[in-house]
Amino acid sequence: MDYVRKLIDVYECGPHFYANLDSTILERWLSEDWPELIEGLKEEEAALEAFRKNLGDYCSRLSVAGAIADAFLNETLDYEQGWYWDFDVERFFPGLHRRVQLGRVKKLEQLPPIIAVLVDKFARERYAPLHDNNKYHRHSRLRSDGWDWCDLAEAKNADNRTAFLLREEHFPEQIGWKTHERYALVLNVSPETSASTLIHKSSSPYIGARTNSSGKVIPCCRLPDGAPAIPVLENLSTLRLFRRFIPVIYLLDNEPLLIEYEWSMMANGNWYLKEAREIEDDYASDSQVNSNGKEDVLITQILQMPLGAGPKSEPRYDGPWNDAWSDSIPF
């Protein structure tokens, strides 16, 4: 459970995350990051089932704590989700939600510690000052060296409708310091697309309608202008690999550019799927196609990143050795 809490601290992104905590997703993250822990639980009879029960109870309690923290801050609570308050609030904090609603709990120290911590987290996010850099996605310019695991030449020869999935074990060291994600997408963009266009934050990725080469309207995860959109339902298994951000590495002419786009399936996965299916239903008829015939730039395939030979090992020095003490060294 200590490792589960570490995962939550790294990948949480506000009230929506806590409202939709999913124990199965956390267990999957745990098995990906520390597989030896899950394997150890499997070795003891009933240990894994006991862990899953504790994890489910912990997620339920933390979701209720987040909801009460949100109520304490006078937020809207429902987030356009009709099932939001289906949690068993009274099981964990009897009567507290009602007292908060009636204004009888006004001080942080009157709250249980787990709720007070979340109030502090949510408040700091809400009152964070706005600077010019808030207008841009998190980004880093990358060096062109250190890509020994990757065949960059082959990736650069692909068109901008092909994306490559890069796994953490093949990250250049410089990327490992810049993201907590275990995967990244590698993309080409049209030559006229500038880095400033890609990093500008018009909005976080959201689900929108886009037109494919057949004129059919499909739901897509929209990235900034100049970058191809990602069809959602066709690439759902890939999109579920990302935990809080989609790191995209653009292979620009001068140097690669890493941008992290906010994307949390834990926090917003139900909303993403709801929007995608509504778009699909709205345009289900073959007759409802894009009337102007304009085709959007969409990713048509996501392939594994082409790999190179790997880093070259440093030559090992085998002597001669001079390990005699020098008489000139004072002791």
Image (spheres, grey):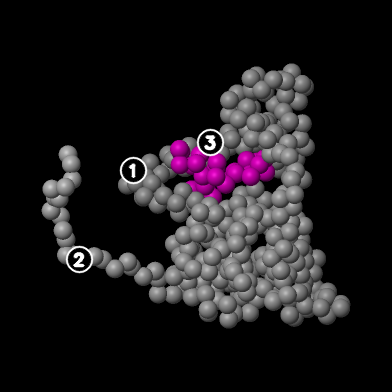
User: Picture quarter containing residue 310?
Assistant: bottom left
| Residue type pointed to by label 2 | Asp
Magenta stretch encompasses residue 6: yes
| Mark 2 closeness class: few <14, some 14–19, many ≥20 residues within 10 Å | few
The residues bearing labels 2 and 1 have C-alpha atoms spaced at a distance of 51 Å
The residue located at (13%, 48%) in the rendering is 327
Above or below — where is 237 with respect to 156?
above
- Between 69 and 160, the one lying in front of the other is 160
Q: Which of 65 and 298 is in front in this view?
A: 298
Image quadrant where one finds the C terminus: top left
Part of the protein shown in magenta:
1-27
Q: Is residue 270 above or below residue 189?
A: above
Identify the disc placed on residue 58.
3
Q: Earlier in the sequence, mark 2 or mark 1?
A: 1
Q: Which residue is drawn at 50% across and 59% down?
A: 174
Q: How crowded is mark 1: few (under 14 residues within 10 Å), some or many (20 or more)?
A: few
Mark 3 and mark 1 in contact? Answer it, CB < 8 Å.
Answer: no
Sequence-first disc among 3 and 1: 1
- The tag earlier along the polypeptide, 2 or 3, is 3
Mark 1, residue position: 45
Which amino acid lies under the numbered mark 3 shown in the image of this protein?
Tyr
Residue 153 placed where, x, y %?
A: 53, 78
Q: Is mark 1 on a helix, strand or loop?
A: loop
The residue that mark 2 highlights is: 318
Left or right side of 236 for 216: right
| Amino acid found under the numbered disc labelled 1 | Glu
Mark 3 and mark 1: Cα distance apart in space: 22 Å
**Which residue is nearer to you in this view: 229 or 142?**
142
Q: Can residue 222 be spotted in the picture?
A: no
Residue 287 rendering spot, x and y as whole percentages? 83, 77
Where residue 60 sits: x, y (%)? Answer: 58, 37
One can see residue 185 in this view: yes
